[in-house]
Each structure stands twice: as C-alpha cells, then as structure tokens.
Amino acid sequence: MTLEQLEKTVAELQAKQDLHELNVRYANGVDRRDRALLETLWWPDSVIDFGLFVGSGAQFAEVISAPNPAVEITTHFASNELFELDGDRATGRSYVIGTSVSVAADGSKTDQMVSGRYLDKYERRGGVWKFTHRLFVVDWIVTQPSSAIWDAGIGAAAKRGRPGPDDVSHEFFKAEKEA
C-alpha cells in the first residue's frame, strides 16, 4: 500500500466515523430532548421526513425537544450502518429500534417498540458532516400496556433516565468536567 492509498483509506475511515458519531448524537439528542445538540446536526436546507413530522432539521429539533406529557421517555438504537462516500457527499442506511413509554390522559401507560430504517443523505461543508435529508421507514411495531416495575429490582435500584436537563447524564458529566 502506498502512502497515498493509506492517506485515502484513513480519510475514508475518518469520514465514516464522523457519520457514525453524527447518528449517535442524533439518537442522544432525540432521547434526551436536547434541542441545542439536535440543531448542530442539520444543515439549514435540510429535510427530515419522520412520518408524523416533515420539515427542516431545525424545525424537527424544536418540535422533538418541546415538553410532551404524552411521552414519558424514549430510547433508540441505530446499528448496521452502511455509508457510501462520494467526495463531500454521502448516503447512509442504518437500522433502528426505538422504544417509548406513552402516557394517556387517564395516566395509563403504553410501551411501544418500533423497528425500522433511517435512509440518510449527508454533506461535508467546511470539513463538517451534517444531515441534509433523513427519511424514517417503519418495518415493525409492537404496542402493549406498560409492564414496567419501578419499585423493585433494577427499576428501584438503578438511576432512572429522564428526557431533558433532568437526565442523570448531565450531572454525571458536569462533575467530571469540574474535577
């Protein structure tokens, strides 16, 4: 392998790592309802089609981070990522599993698990990769009354995740930065 080939390979690997981290930040931003983080992931001319929402990345960040008493918590995982590079543009496909707990007006809770795919287009501008277009495709859904047990076992013993600034991660990493 020549030095030129090695440099090209390293640059491609770095681009794919940057795109992977963009996907991770997206999941973190959505699950924590972190508007500031989400706004950094999209180019101003971006589009996201989430089915229930179609608009710009900035609009999505605003909507998804707004307080929503009907959604207690969300968690989702992206995997099986495949990125195809073309200079400063790229496409990506990743599988996603999302879980949420919804709260009805009467206080009853519903667990939902959704499996699908993200189909993405990205651009690198000024050396920074961001989304230009994301399409969410649903492949499978299961919905059932919530069966969570929060007063015994791991539910009672472990720290509990929360959307927004009340999530334990903010305090955990803040303490590390101050040390």
Image (tube, rainbow, N blue to C red):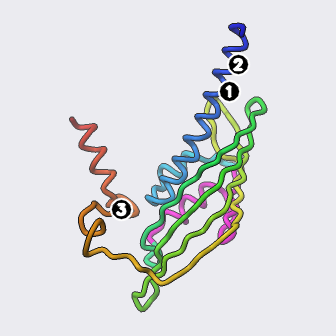
Q: Disc 2 residue type?
A: Lys
Q: As rendered, which of 29 and 84 lies closer to the eye?
A: 84
Whether 116 is drawn above or below 143: the answer is above
- Residue depicted at x 32% and y 51%: 170
Question: Mark 3 belongs to which amino acid?
Answer: Gly
**Part of the protein shown in magenta:** 46-67
Q: Residues within 10 Å of mark 1 (few under 14, many from 20)?
A: some
Q: Is residue 53 magenta?
A: yes
Drawn side of residue 179 relative to residue 55, left or right: left
Q: Is residue 64 magenta?
A: yes
The disc at residue 95 is none
Q: Are marks 1 and 2 in contact (CB under 8 Å)?
A: yes
Image quadrant holding the N terminus, namely top right
Q: Which mark is residue 8?
A: 2
Residue at image mark 1: 12
Which residue is rendered at x = 25% and y = 73% of the image? 152
Residue 80 spot, x, y in % from top left? 64, 48
Residue name at image x 53 percent, y 52 percent: 38
**Badge 1 amino acid:** Glu
Specify the farthest residue to the front.
153
Gap in angstroms between the C-alphas marked 1 and 3: 35 Å
User: Which residue is the site of mark 3?
Assistant: 161
In this view, the residue farthest toward the left is 179
Marks 3 and 2 in Cβ contact (< 8 Å): no
Above or below residue 113? Residue 116 is above
Q: Could you give the CA–CA distance between mark 1 and mark 2, rounded to whole angstroms?
A: 6 Å
